[in-house]
């Protein structure tokens, strides 16, 4: 199903963090549903978007000249895993790679913080999804600067105020993502914006249902205690790293059905903007097409 058959349209700009402008999370409503009325409408929209995304991915795969990197960042229980599962449910899994970034191991700590994601960049024709990403190095380590004790800080920044380190990392991320864009990797970044009340309800749901208890840990409760600190560092990160080459999209995440539809729509739009065409048949294929057809029809 192409985009022209869809009964809805999301305005990409409504979610985008405008490059060069100060961003405030307070200006975005986590409960917004963009005019969609209820789960049924959201599921219909998601179905249309999944179909559009499947067609876009097929062109990306067949064309084999471009690739796509999708980044998901969010606080706990915002719906990253579920969004990846539902949004990508209609694509060919042979063309998608998902990487979840946990705390760096001893080998990874010996390298620059961008070394790890470089190992998982998408090949041409493929989609790579980062469930959390290198952005943790300007988020969680800002809330917990003690994590820096295990890292090798560049000599030029050792002993300097931490604000210089964060600024340097923002600049390195910007250059890195510009390099990706210059080499035909489309970077699409989503921040799932969940409210504190909704996070609480989702945590309670995990605690109250035995089948979901495995999703909860004491660390989730501990990190919730840093809610205000995370809001601040996310705002500063979104302001500093949303660019024309790699913009951030802040997705209202209190209603999962709406978040998933919006994400699928934006991905399909961004791939569609690449103007990809099916590969042209070779001279041999054109010359022998009738011969091959007759052989199959006999």
Image: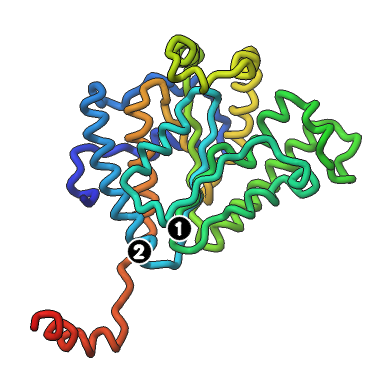
Would residue 291 appear left or right of 216 to someone viewing this image?
left
Q: Residue at x 80, y 47 (%)?
A: 110
Are dots 2 and 1 in contact, CB under 8 Å?
A: no
- Percent coordinates x, y for residue 174 in the rendering: 63, 48
Which residue was labeled with disc 2?
A: 276
Q: Residue at x 72, y 30 (%)?
A: 141
Q: Residue at x 48, y 37 (%)?
A: 190
Work out whether mark 2 precedes mark 1 in sequence or the reverse, and give the earlier one: 1
Q: Residue at x 29, y 54 (%)?
A: 55
- Percent coordinates x, y for residue 263 in the rendering: 38, 38
Is residue 214 visible from the viewing direction of this image? yes
Along the line of sight, the residue nearer the viewer: 46 or 6: 46
Is residue 227 visible from the viewing direction of this image? no
Distance from label 2 to label 1 (Cα)?
A: 14 Å
Q: Residues within 10 Å of mark 2 (few under 14, many from 20)?
A: some
* Colour mapping used in the image: rainbow
- Percent coordinates x, y for residue 282 in the rendering: 31, 83
User: Does 202 sit above or below residue 109?
Assistant: above
Which residue was labeled with disc 1?
A: 126
The image quadrant that residue 20 belongs to is top right
- Percent coordinates x, y for residue 209 in the rendering: 43, 13
In this view, the mark in front (2 or 1): 1
Along the line of sight, the residue nearer the viewer: 88 or 94: 94
User: Does 293 sit above or below residue 50?
Assistant: below
Would residue 263 appear left or right of 47 to someone viewing this image?
right
Residue extending farthest left: 298
Q: Residues within 10 Å of mark 1 (few under 14, many from 20)?
A: many
User: Does 90 sit above or below residue 197?
Assistant: below
Q: Which mark is residue 116?
A: none
User: Does 125 sit above or below residue 70?
Assistant: below
Q: Secondary structure at mark 2?
A: loop
Q: Secondary structure at mark 1?
A: loop
């Amino acid at each position: 199903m192409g985009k022209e058959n869809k009964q809805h349209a999301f305005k990409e700009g409504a979610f985008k963090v405008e490059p060069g402008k100060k961003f405030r999370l307070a200006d975005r409503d986590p409960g917004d549903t963009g005019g969609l009325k209820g789960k049924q409408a959201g599921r219909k929209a998601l179905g249309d978007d999944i179909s559009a995304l499947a067609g876009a991915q097929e062109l990306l795969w067949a064309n084999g000249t471009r690739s796509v990197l999708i980044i998901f960042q969010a606080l706990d229980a915002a719906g990253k895993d579920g969004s990846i599962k539902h949004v990508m449910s209609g694509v060919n899994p042979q063309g998608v790679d998902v990487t979840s970034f946990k705390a760096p191991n001893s080998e990874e700590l010996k390298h620059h913080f961008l070394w790890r994601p470089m190992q998982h960049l998408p090949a041409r024709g493929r989609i790579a999804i980062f469930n959390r990403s290198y952005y943790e190095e300007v988020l969680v380590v800002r809330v917990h600067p003690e994590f820096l004790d295990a890292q090798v800080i560049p000599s030029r920044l050792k002993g300097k105020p931490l604000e210089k380190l964060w600024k340097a990392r923002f600049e390195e991320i910007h250059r890195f993502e510009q390099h990706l864009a210059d080499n035909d990797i489309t970077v699409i970044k989503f921040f799932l914006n969940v409210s504190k009340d909704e996070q609480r309800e989702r945590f309670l749901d995990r605690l109250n249902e035995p089948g979901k208890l495995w999703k909860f840990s004491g660390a989730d409760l501990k990190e919730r205690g840093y809610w205000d600190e995370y809001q601040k560092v996310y705002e500063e990160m979104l302001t500093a790293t949303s660019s024309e080459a790699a913009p951030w999209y802040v997705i209202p995440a209190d209603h999962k059905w709406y978040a998933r539809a919006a994400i699928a729509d934006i991905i399909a739009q961004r791939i569609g903007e690449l103007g990809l065409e099916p590969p042209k048949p070779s001279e041999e294929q054109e010359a022998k097409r009738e011969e091959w057809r007759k052989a199959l029809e006999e």
